[in-house]
Amino acid sequence: MASAPKGPWNHLPTELWQLVFDLSDQKELAAISLVSKRLHTQVEPSLYANFSWVPHVNQQLPSISKLGGRDVSEYTKTRRKRRTRGLGPHGPPPFLLLRTILNRPELTRYIKDVKVLAPMRQDGLFWDGFEAREGGLSKEETALCERAIRRMEHVSRARWEVGLRIGSLEIAIALLLSRLCQIRSIEIRIRGGSMVSSALFEALGGPSTMCRLQSIKSVAVSIDQNDYGDPVFDRYGGNPFDIDHQMKALMSLPRLEKLSVNCFAPDTIFWPSTLPLAHGLKTLYLNYSDLNEETLRKTLLATPVLEDLECELVYDRSMGEYCDGEKLNAALSLVSDTLRRLVLVIDILYPNETDDGDGLWNVVRPTGSMKNFKQLRFLIFPLITVVEFTPEPSDLQNILPDNLEVMDLKWYPPFPDGSRRRAANRAIKAYHEIKPALGGIYTIFH
C-alpha cells in the first residue's frame, strides 16, 4: 500500500519549526497541532507553555446553584459510554485543562507560566444539566482528584471534596494548580471577595508542596483595570481582599525572585510580627496597597537582597495619620545596601477635610539624608517627604544619593503652604544645575 503523501512542512528542520512556534499565538499553535502527528508532537511544549484565563470583569460565570446542589456524577452517569463529550467544550478553560492533564499527566512538565482568575465560592462550572452531563469528570477522573485531595495535608479537605462533587470552579482551578510541578510564574487575578481561605492559595502554600514549588520564581496577585489602565478599586470603600493573610505563604516560596501584590493592606493588629526570610527575592511591587512606615518595615525585614521596590503608603487625614519621614527612611534603609530602584507613592484620604482645625496634611519629619543608598540608580519619591521644613537650595544635594541616574520627585502630596513650596522649587532647580545630565522628569512649580 502506498504511503500517504507528505506535505512540504515535513522537510523543515525542528529548529525552524521552533522559530515558527515562538512567533505564533495560542490559536495558531492549536491549528498547527492539527496538521500532522509529527507537528502535534513538536508543538505540544509551546502549545501548553502558557496558560491564561482571566475573563472580562463584566463576563458572567455560571453559579453552582444552576445544578441545584446536585452531585455532577448524577448527570454524567447518563452519558453514553461510546459517545464523545458533545460537539464543543463544556466548562471554562481551566477545567478543560484539568481534565486534559488528568488523562495525560506528562503534559504538566510543559506548563511554565499561568495566569488565572481567583473565582468566588459560588462560581460553578456548568450552566445547566446538559453541560454537566457532557462535560463533567468521568468516574476515573473524579477518583484521581479525590486521591489527590486525600494526600494534601494543608487544605480544607472536606470543602475541596464537596466542591469537586458539586462542580465548584474554585476547586477545579485549585486542583489544576496542585498538579503543576514545573511552573516558573503565576499570576492570580483577585476580584470581588476575601482571599483568607481561598483554595487557590491553599494549592500554592503549605509545607507538603514546597518541593513541587521549587520552580516558581515569580508570583503576582493583581486586580482588574479599566480601559485607561486605572485599577477597578475603591480605596474609600475598604479593602475586601485580605491578601495580607497570604503573604506569609507567598514569601515562603523557596526560589521566589519577584513578587507583585496589589491591594496589600496589612492589619496592624492581626498581621504576623515577622515574615519568613525571602532569601532570593529581588523585586517587590506593592502597588495600590495600604502601607505605613511600620508595615513597610516589617515587610522589608524579610527581603535582605531586595533590588527593586515599588510601594504605596496611605494616610487617612480624617484619622490624624501623618507620615514620619525619619521612620520611613529607617524602614527603607533595611535594604539600602542592595536597592537599585525605588518607586514610592503616597496617597492621602480626605486631604481637604480640615474642619477639625489641624490644617492641611503634612509630614511629621522629613526623611533626612539618603546618602547610605549607594546602589540606588532610579528614584521616584514624594518631594514633601524629602525637603526640610525650611528648605535651602543646597538641601537636595546633601540629601539624595550620589549615584542616581534617573529621578522624579513628585509634587503630590502638595505642600501645605506656598513659601515652602516655592523654596522646594528653588532647591530642585539648584540640584538640576549641579547634575544636568541626570535623567528623569522634573515637575517644576511656577
Image: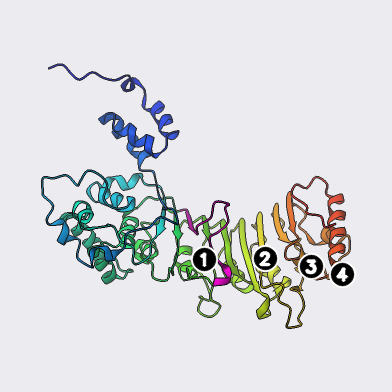
Q: Amino acid at mark 1?
A: Leu
Task: Say whether disc 4 or disc 3 marks the residue closer to the N-terminus.
Answer: 4
Task: Say whether disc 2 or disc 4 marks the residue closer to the N-terminus.
Answer: 2
Q: Are marks 1 and 3 in contact (CB under 8 Å)?
A: no
Q: Which residue is mark 1?
A: 277
Q: Which residue is mark 3?
A: 415
Task: Say whether disc 1 or disc 3 marks the residue closer to the N-terminus.
Answer: 1
Within-10-Å neighbours for mark 2: few <14, some 14–19, many 20+: some
Q: CA–CA distance between discs 2 and 4?
A: 21 Å
Q: Is residue 44 magenta?
A: no
Q: Which residue is mark 4?
A: 390
User: For the view shown, which residue lies furthest in the bottom direction?
Assistant: 356
Closer to the eye: label 2 or 4:
2
Q: CA–CA distance between discs 2 and 1?
A: 26 Å
Q: Image check: 153 left or right of 325?
A: left
Q: CA–CA distance between discs 2 and 3?
A: 13 Å
Task: Say whether disc 1 or disc 4 marks the residue closer to the N-terminus.
Answer: 1
Q: Is residue 106 visible?
A: yes
Q: Are marks 1 and 4 in contact (CB under 8 Å)?
A: no
Q: Amino acid at mark 2?
A: Ile
Residue at 76% in and 66% down: 414
Q: Is residue 280 visible?
A: no
> Could you tell me residue 233's position as x and y percent?
54, 64
The part of the chain drawn in magenta is: 217-237
Task: Say whether disc 2 or disc 1 marks the residue closer to the N-terminus.
Answer: 1
Q: Amino acid at mark 3?
A: Phe
Within-10-Å neighbours for mark 4: few <14, some 14–19, many 20+: few
Q: CA–CA distance between discs 1 and 4?
A: 40 Å
Q: Which residue is mark 2?
A: 346
